[in-house]
Image (spheres, rainbow, N blue to C red):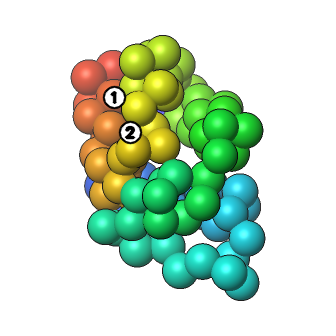
Amino acid sequence: MTELTKKEIEEKVYGILRDVILPETQVITPEKKLAADLGCDSLDILDITMRIEREFRFTVRHKDAGRMGDMTVDELCGMVNDKIKDQGL
């Protein structure tokens, strides 16, 4: 995988969220929390986790997946960005 910019990572994460969350009912912004604001339930979080793993080719740690519902969209993008930087992807 070629090195992705922070903007490219954000675009891909937003795309994943749009695919999982009904776009006509929710506006996705950086400060919204996945569960409380966007209405993601545990199955949505699992779907998002699997899509992130497939898109970015890394494994989301169990502790990160477990707290993903409480993350903001910005925190989720940051987690993905940090993981990519840590692994040199």
SS class of the residue under badge 1?
helix
The residues tagged by marks 1 and 2 sit, at their Cα atoms, a distance apart of: 5 Å
Amino acid type, residue under disc 1 in the picture = Lys
Q: Which residue is mark 2?
A: 80
* Residues at discs 1 and 2 in contact (Cβ within 8 Å): yes
Q: Nearer the viewer, residue 37 or 57?
A: 37
| Circle number at residue 83 | 1
Q: Is residue 8 visible?
A: no
| Circle number at residue 44 | none
Find residue 83 and report its image quarter. top left
Query: Residue visible at 37% across and 47% down?
Result: 71
Location of residue 43 with respect to 39 vertically, above or below: above
Name, please, the residue furthest toward the bottom.
24
Q: Is residue 27 visible?
A: yes
Find residue 3 and report its image quarter. top left
With 74 as the anchor, is 49 left or right in this view?
right
Residue 11 spot, x, y in % from top left: 48, 64
SS class of the residue under badge 2?
helix
